[in-house]
Amino acid sequence: MQLTERVALITGAGSGIGKAAAHLLAKEGAKVAALGLTEEEVAETVSQIHSKGGEAITLIADISQPEPMQKAIQHIVDKWGRIDIVFANAGINGVWAPIEELQPEEWDKTLNVNLTGTFLTVKYAVPYLKKQGGSVIVTSSVNGTRIFSNTGATAYSCSKAAQVAFTKMIALELAEQRVRVNVICPGAIETNINESTQKRHLEQVKEPVEFPEGEIPLTDGAPGKSEQVAQLVLFLASDASSHISGTEIWIDGTQSLLQG
């Protein structure tokens, strides 16, 4: 197993990419701290890992709030004494709307969860990562990095672009301590994040574009799977990527090259 005895924090571990990564990293020997906003979100993930002989704990916190995140990190250290891997994955799509209709509080919520949440997750884990080195993986998106045609997704795209800059800044800062920091940019993946997306009046501003053969050339339009993204997370968390840091990796079946 590639991650034996290593400790991994995974945010947004209750569904989609986070859940798939939690299962795969646990299968490879990692002790998994599965973090979600409510216990209901992550209880099933932890229970399933236990049923397969893995080791995992449930953490409850709002990633955009400093005190709960500090307590969550401290709980991991009290339990296992170290942190080796941080998968800062939790995020929201938020509200997609024309710029004049996007409310300041809607902008703030998306940036607070996606960007401030990433900052806090990494910030409070860094002192423990520095002790022995480790890996940080941030979930960004094709939106804001290669695709800018999803009109109305302004707050979301800005938060995702900023995560890439954050990753590169931190990668250089932490290189001396052997902490690698990389960012993944998924395209269309089969998850439930779209269920919480609020879209308003986009037909007024969206440019009409059609892709008769589908938006994802590699799969004839079919979206990717969370398990495929989890394999990338495993690679970046493991020693197989020991000389990779400060890098963004798109996992989208060439979708962003077509739509960008």
Image: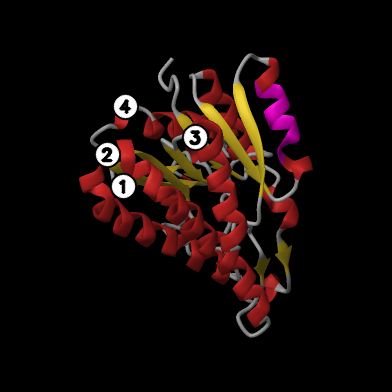
Q: Are marks 2 and 3 in contact (CB under 8 Å)?
A: no
Q: Secondary structure at mark 4?
A: helix
Viewer can see residue 225: no
Question: Is residue 46 found inside the magenta-colored segment of the image?
Answer: yes
The segment highlighted magenta reads 42-49
Task: Classify mark 1: helix, strand or loop.
Answer: loop
Can you see residue 117? yes
Disc 1 crowd rating (10 Å Cα; few below 14, some 14-19, many 20+) is some
Give the Cα separation between the discs numbered 2 and 3: 18 Å
The reply to whether dot 1 and dot 2 touch (C-beta < 8 Å) is yes
Q: Position of residue 164 (x, y in %)?
A: 39, 57
Residue at image location 58% in from the left, 31% down from the top: 22
Is 206 magenta? The answer is no
Q: Secondary structure at mark 2?
A: loop
Q: How many marks?
A: 4
| Residue appearing at x 53%, y 27% in the figure | 31
Per the model, the C-alpha gap separating discs 2 and 4 is: 10 Å
**Residue to which mark 2 is pinned:** 244
Q: Which residue is mark 3?
A: 8
- Dot in front, 3 or 1: 3
Q: Residues within 10 Å of mark 2 (few under 14, many from 20)?
A: some
Which numbered mark, 4 or 3, is in the foreground of this view? Answer: 3
Identity of the amino acid at label 4? Asp
Q: Is residue 8 above or below residue 213?
A: above
